[in-house]
Amino acid sequence: MSMTLIEHIEVGSGGAASISFVSVGDIPSDYTDLLVVLSGRSTAGANVDGIRIALNGSTSNLTHRRLIGGGSGSGGSASGTNGEIGLISAANNTANTFGNCQIYIPNYRSTSAKSISADSVSENNSTEAYQGIYAMLWNPASNVPITSITLDMLGGNLVQYSSATLYGITAGSDGTTTVS
Amino acid sequence: MTDRPTKLIVDCSTGERTVVELTDEEIAEREAMAAQAEADRLAQEQAEADLQALKDSAKAKLIAGEPLTADEAAVIVL
C-alpha cells in the first residue's frame, strides 16, 4: 500500500467543533482509496468520546457496527445509525493524552455504496482505556463519490493540538489496482 | 462573552484553511447530540453494571450450590 499525504490540519487554541476536508473530489485521480488518521482529545466529561463522521455534509444513510473493549473487561458489540466511526480520549482521561483513530475508505470515487472500516483507541494511564473496531456502510438513495469528510465528537469538542491527516492510497497503472 | 465554537475546514484542492464560527442551529444540534451521548453513556454503564452484578451473583450461587435464576444462567452458559 502506497500512501501519499494530501492534507494535515491541527486544532489551534480554543479547540474546534469539527474538522472538514472539502473538495476531496478535486484531489488527483491517482488515488482509489482514502485514509484519515485522527489524533484527538475531546472536551466531553467522560473517559471516552465517540467520533462522528459526515460524508458530503451528511450523517444520514450511515449504519455502523462496532466492537469495543475496555480495560476493566467492559465493552461489547453494538450497532447504530448516528455516524459513529470511532472513539478517543476525553476530559476524564489522563491529562494531555490523546486517542487515535484510523479510518479507511476504499473506492471513494465510486458510485456504489461505500464500506468504511476504522479502528481506534483511547489512551489513559488508568484501567479504563478503550479500543474499538468499526464497520460502516454509507448507502444513500443515490450513491455518489465522496467529496467531503467531516469529523466531530458526539459529546464535546476537539481540544488544541488534536489533528487530522488525509492520505491518498495510490492506484496502479490500470487505474484500479492499489500497489504497495 | 463566551467565544462561539468554530469548525476547521481545509480545501484539498487549494490547501486553504478556514476557521468558521458555528451557527446557532449548529450549536443547538451539537448540544442535543452531547446530551444524547451522555444519556447513552450512562445507559451503557448501567447495563455493564447490571451484567456484572448478574455474573457475580451467578458465581456466588454456583459456589454455594444454590439454584440460579434464568438470567444468571444466561450470563455463564455459552
Image (cartoon, rainbow, N blue to C red):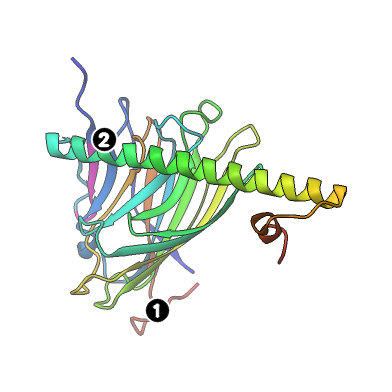
Which region is colored magenta? B7-13
Q: Amino acid at mark 2?
A: Glu
Q: Residue A162: image x %, image y %?
A: 40, 37
Residue ID at (31%, 63%) = A62
Q: Residue B33: image x %, image y %?
A: 29, 42
- Residue of label 1: A172
- Between A166 and A130, the residue placed more toward the observer is A130
Q: Amino acid at mark 1?
A: Gly
* Rendered image quadrant of residue A156: top left
Marking on residue B31: 2
Disc 2 to disc 1, C-alpha distance = 45 Å
- Left/right placement of residue A75 relative to residue B2 reads right
> Is residue A47 found inside the magenta-colored segment of the image?
no
Q: Is residue A157 above or below residue A23?
A: above
Residue ID at (38%, 75%) = A171
Disc 2 vs disc 1: which is toward the camera? 2
Secondary structure, mark 1, is loop
- Left/right placement of residue B5 relative to residue B68 reads left
